[in-house]
Image (cartoon, coloured by chain):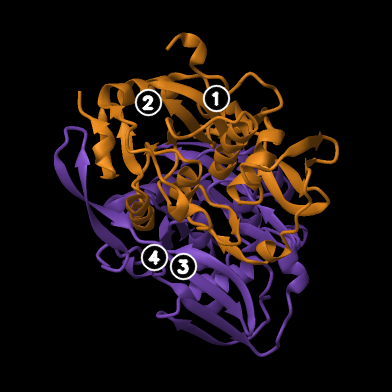
Chain colours: A orange, B purple
Amino acid sequence: MGKTSEFIIKPDPADERLTEKVQGVDQDGQAVTTSVTVERPLTLFLNSQEIVTMMTICDYPEFLAVGYLVNQNMLAPGDEVTAIEFEEDIETVVVRTTQETNFEDKLKKKTLTSGCAQGTVFGDLMEKFDEVKLSPEVKLKTSDLYSLVKKINTAPSLYLEAGAIHGCVLCKGDRPILYMEDVGRHNAVDKIAGYMFLNEMSGEDKMFYTTGRLTSEMVIKTVQMGVPILISRSGFTAWGVDLAKQADLTLIGRARGERFLVLSGDHRIEYD
Amino acid sequence: MGKTSEFIIKPDPADERLTEKVQGVDQDGQAVTTSVTVERPLTLFLNSQEIVTMMTICDYPEFLAVGYLVNQNMLAPGDEVTAIEFEEDIETVVVRTTQETNFEDKLKKKTLTSGCAQGTVFGDLMEKFDEVKLSPEVKLKTSDLYSLVKKINTAPSLYLEAGAIHGCVLCKGDRPILYMEDVGRHNAVDKIAGYMFLNEMSGEDKMFYTTGRLTSEMVIKTVQMGVPILISRSGFTAWGVDLAKQADLTLIGRARGERFLVLSGDHRIEYD
């Protein structure tokens, strides 16, 4: 439970590639300088197949690439990734696997998902969803939740530096472990999934925190990562709640200060 | 300038199809009932070609369908829409035009855009961007901006009722005209574009207000709609600012109460 296990990865607002200074004027016509987040295109290939072009802050292109493929069910837990090649100058990342695969059919079926977490979901969104059994044993103490939310909100971040960004945090108990930010929340989720896949980190004893809304896509991705508890400072959508109930996911929304609302799986909450 | 020209369309939080009551528990373990937004899938066809499946609150499927096609450059100003058929039971909307088109090539190229406004952009994102000339004559008085923001924030909305939703408003001077909400901000933009297309409403003397961030996609869509001023209560991304400067779009962010920040095109602001 030492400090060493908090924030294996956290935002680095001092990284000069991630923000840019821009001149502007304020409500009184006074000149001001402000920081804005820089987004870049990144085209992802799986072996020789072009999959998608993403807009990202590009701090962890390798995790983003692998996590995207994992969350689209294009990489399975047993698959061996032999190389990940990020070519900064041509804004490309190539993920190589031992077994070549073809996702032509998957790439044809597009669904625009809702909410801030959105992006495109190829193929069958729900492919693995029904098979996942989330651990009923994991519990969340309300005191740990309040402590966790405070640590996340006070950690230096691009959000505090420049705004206009989403954050996702993989946590255990009251410890934030992986804190990723990106212009699209789906990227932040994918970067965490990529780290977990490459480091064989299990989600079953963890919790997932997000700044964005609890949409269907967010619920599906959390369940697919095997994480039994999902926490947000924002609100809910009806389909998100339905899916959470179906998977027995603990769904906590509007978590601010010492307040929150649970709309599914409240058996994992311990009020202390 | 009478009241009649305010809010031709505004949110209808009383519409029972748009929200659902859900039971949950709060931070003290007390049972609570809350409203959540309902999202539904809607599959869009252009004539016989399946284009995309969107998640939407589905209050204006016809405007959403047409606006999506307009913003993807699949419908041009001269094109004649002969019918829009919304089939609620099979969650489908078909847009029919006099001239059949084929967008196979366009549909193959996918870019995931960033930010809350994201979604998939097919084909060349920037197709029309460089051709648009935004009116330099339109001015925005700071007093009108403050009055406008207040009207928008105090209008009854799904946001105030259930949260977890984005809003976009087409405005003129201090008058909000079209106020659309949806689970994804791109849908709210598209519904406004669809209304404008079908009602031959010009954007050149208007302003666009959004609750979400000023990303590249938001700037591109505003410019493509010919609207010279874009306002948000959220922040900026670097590429959004670059594109706004390139198109001489007035870009106003962090507009809350009587404060704001302009990072492009401040010649359209009149401080009064």
Residue B226, position as x, y percentages in the image: 63, 62
Q: In terms of secondary structure, where does tag 1 sit? A: helix
Q: Residue at x 37, y 58 (%)?
A: A239
- Callout 2: chain: A
Q: CA distance from mark 3 to mark 1?
A: 36 Å
Residue A165 screen position, x and y as percent: 54, 36
| Front residue of B12 and B201 | B12
Mark 3 lies on residue: B41
State the CA–CA distance, disc 2 to disc 1. Answer: 18 Å
Q: On residue B1, which mark appears?
A: 4
Residue beneath disc 1: A161
In terms of secondary structure, where does tag 4 sit? loop
Marks 2 and 1, the one that precedes in the sequence: 2
Q: CA distance from mark 1 to mark 4?
A: 41 Å
Name the chain under label 3: B
Front position among marks 4 and 3: 3
| Distance (Cα) linking label 3 and label 2 | 33 Å
- Against A165, residue A120 (above or below) is below
Q: Amino acid at mark 1?
A: Glu
